[in-house]
Image (cartoon, helix red, strand yellow):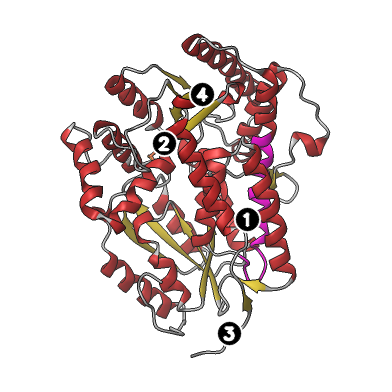
Amino acid sequence: MVEKKYKTAPLKSWDKAKEIRLNIYKEIAEAKSKGKVLLGGGAESLIALPTGFDYAMLVGEPYGAAISYLAKSDPDEYMKYVEASEHAGYPRDLCAYMRNYIGSILRDKYVFGGPFPKIDFYLQAGFCDTHSKWYQAVSDITGRPYFSLDLVPFDWEIEGESEKTKDLKRKYIVDQIHEAIAWMEKQTGREFNDETFIQGVLNECESTSLWAKVCIANRAIPAPLDEKTMLSLYVLAVIGRPRNDVVEFYRELLDEVEDRVANQIAANPYETARIITDSQPPWFALDLFRLLETYGVVSVGAHYTFGLSGGWEYDEENKTWEAGKTPQEKGVEVKTRDEAANVLADWWLRTGTVCRGVRHSGAGKIQRIMDMVDRWKVDGAIVHLNRGCEGTSLGQMDIVSSLLERGLPTMTYEGNHADPREYDENRTFARIESFMETMGLKQLYEFKKGE
Ligand code: SF4
């Protein structure tokens, strides 16, 4: 056994993250019996919007991922979700999360136990091209109404948009926020509470900015976190960023991660090389990160993991991205619904980076990935050519070419983030092992599956 280079320690926040996630799914199951508004929708549908109600929200993509975990523990049960969706005519080339979600509705089965929750309405934003159609289909199946916001494509730090077009885009989203609130009031017959909405918006800004700061802490050598762990941490921002307990969690997590940096506590005590990945991982096969560890490799993150619910602000002078400054940090007071709507629209347009990658030209995403390579001191990249996601796989081969052009060892593997029929673990492991050799790395200890 090779000697460890760094200290390591379990992450103290780990259990808390699991507890909050499960609580959120429990609240969804119990929402109707507790008289709450229950809605469904996508992760980037401006999820602070319903905070003006006493509510619970089932966020579609992480729910689709939760179903795909079954592929590992109970493959036969998992196939029942997939087949229900496919028999209803939703083919394999559609978003794999969407297919799992629709399978869950058609089976009337909530993966966390009991029947599929009785959703009052669906609220969605056109984040990638699938999103609005996803909830249109769900609305057709369930008969529940849906509202879709149009999130305009943007990438203004890269595309050099004028202040006038930026203002028009902000206003376009603010108008839709007001429209969505009026629509939700009509659907529920309940009054929208501006105070809780304002707090929800401020929480959304703070959670996402804190997550960006946690990612920034991972620039340290040794990295305090590995991507496999980050995938269990970022999800709280995805499903609950406007919540008080989620903001509190990220404050504590940032303290803990900064303490790990100060004390050189490593995610991988053998850290020898650092990589990034691209796109969502195959959720049912996260062992690939364990295989990398046996070579002393730590995956420090991904454009996706950092950005899906991360608040990143472009630093014009240094041509890089830093954690977005929240309204609270800037001393901006938010007192009215309209002010909160403006803050939310501005925050989303200014700091949401993944949406730029799925709705706009690849130039911005390539620049952000190069920034990660430089600032997170990355030695290689592993790109998941993800057949289950038309959004995050957009432009992937251009990214690979750009990384290879700058001389960064880069490998690809084909797969699907939520459908194991399109992922070949033996072949992927063989590719990773030869990639490790090309990076000049040796296996330090034996890989044991499931550890
Ligand atoms: S970005 Fe990918 S995973 Fe998300 S809705 Fe679009 S296709 Fe599905």
Of the image marks 1 and 4, the number of the one nearer the N terminus: 4
**Real-space Cα separation, disc 3 to disc 1, in angstroms:** 24 Å
Whether residue 439 is in magenta: the answer is no
Q: Is residue 68 left or right of residue 368?
A: left
Identify which amino acid the numbered label 1 is placed on.
Answer: Cys
Q: Position of residue 111 (x, y in %)?
A: 34, 42
Residue 399 visible here: yes
**Real-space Cα separation, disc 4 to disc 2, in angstroms:** 19 Å
Q: In the rendered image of this protein, does residue 9 appear above or below residue 238?
A: below
Read off the residue under disc 1: 215
Q: Secondary structure at mark 1?
A: helix
Which range is magenta?
203-224
Quadrant (top left/top right/bottom left/bottom right) for the C terminus: bottom left
Packing grade of label 3 (10 A; few <14, some 14-19, many >=20) is few
Query: What's the residue at 69%, 25% (across, down)?
Result: 198
Read off the residue under disc 2: 60
Read off the residue under disc 4: 36
Of the image marks 2 and 1, the number of the one nearer the N terminus: 2
Identify which amino acid the numbered label 3 is placed on.
Answer: Lys
